[in-house]
Image (cartoon, rainbow, N blue to C red):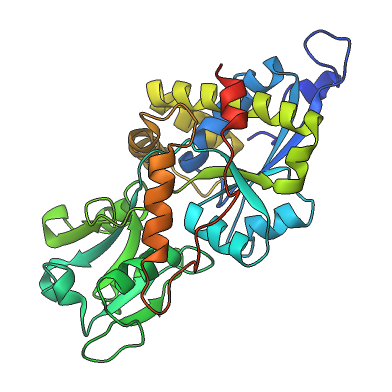
Amino acid sequence: MKKLISLAAAGGFAASGALAADDVTLQLKWVTQAQFGGYYVALEKGFYEDEDLNVTIKPGGPDIAPVQVLLGGGADVMVDWMPSALAARENGAPVVNIAQPYKASGMMLTCLKDSGVTGPDDFKGRTLGVWFFGNEYPFLSWMSQLNIPTEGGDDGVEVLKQGFNVDPLLQKQADCISTMTYNEYWQVIDAGIAEDELVTFKYEDQGVATLEDGLYVLEENLEDPEFRDEMVRFVKASMKGWKYAEENPDEAAQIVLEYDETGAQTEKHQKRMMREVAKLTAGSNGALDVADYERTVNSLLSGGSDPVITKVPEGAYTLDITDAAFK
């Protein structure tokens, strides 16, 4: 395993040898895994070093809120889902999207076929596993659009606060659980449940998909020309890492494993995850697609009396960083 610092730190100087590399700290949304493969590839392959950057990658976890780390000065840039970031912004955290490596959503509900759930109309009266800590917003928005209350009852759904595992489905505590196409879905399969025993509802297919892993910084920092320049170089190198990971998923997965200090990840799972993640980053050059942003905002606003956000955000993204990175 490796320490999460770029090779530039070894000498303390940029490639030219004349100036020290600029320090950048990235806070991940979750633990070290192929979900973040592009950043680890950029670190390992020297893409950050090539841009005179000394990058530190900080893994996330169940007790780590990336936006709080960012607000507290523990990171310069964070990975977060847009629903969580926009909700945080409306609540006073001035976070701004500067790049969007993920083009598609990997989120879905996975149900046991023998539960009798065949479509969204069957959700009523059921127990559904939902992640929280900012991950609940796409689900709540979807239920609002379906006019299904989330307080239980025959006409609503009972929300089970799901841990970051698939136990509620395996133990039949829930009819359906939250899964990602690249992670928890395959944990269900690995637990011995065949794919034909499952019914899945991808948020993309339901027309309620919202943007996931994007890069966010504090608005006030963008007023600093030096910081903007660092982010231009950081995004440029990161996207080089993502495109390399797409083309070489097995190698990228191996790189991720080298940086996993917990030793909890397996080669089989990480290789499979990286191949699935590559499907979600494909088609993105790192620049936020404004149409995707507007779709996400409209989905979050469509919550009836209890929307995720209550007004169209202002200043929640900038294209300046990616425009400069890929001009």
Rendering coords of residue 125 (x, y %)? 21, 85
- Could you tell whether 226 is left or right of 209 in the image? right
Q: How many numbered marks are there?
A: 0
Viewer-proximal residue among 278 and 250: 278
Q: Quadrant of the N terminus?
A: top right
Reply above or below: 261 against 94.
above
Rendering coords of residue 127 (x, y %)? 28, 80
State whether residue 168 appears in this view.
no
Image quadrant where residue 248 sits: top left
- Could you tell whether 24 is left or right of 129 in the image? right
Residue visible at 47% across and 42% down? 35
Q: Quadrant of the C terminus?
A: top right
Rendering coords of residue 9 (x, y %)? 80, 25
- Could you tell whether 59 is left or right of 84 in the image? right
State whether residue 1 appears in this view.
yes
Image quadrant where residue 24 sits: top right
Residue visible at 49% across and 45% down? 213
In the picture as drawn, the residue positioned furthest to the bottom comes out as: 153
Residue visible at 71% across and 19% down? 49
Residue visible at 87% across and 20% down? 20
Viewer-proximal residue among 157 and 162: 157
Rendering coords of residue 282 (x, y %)? 36, 30
Viewer-proximal residue among 315 and 120: 315
Reply above or below: 118 against 59.
below
In the picture as drawn, the residue positioned furthest to the top comes out as: 16
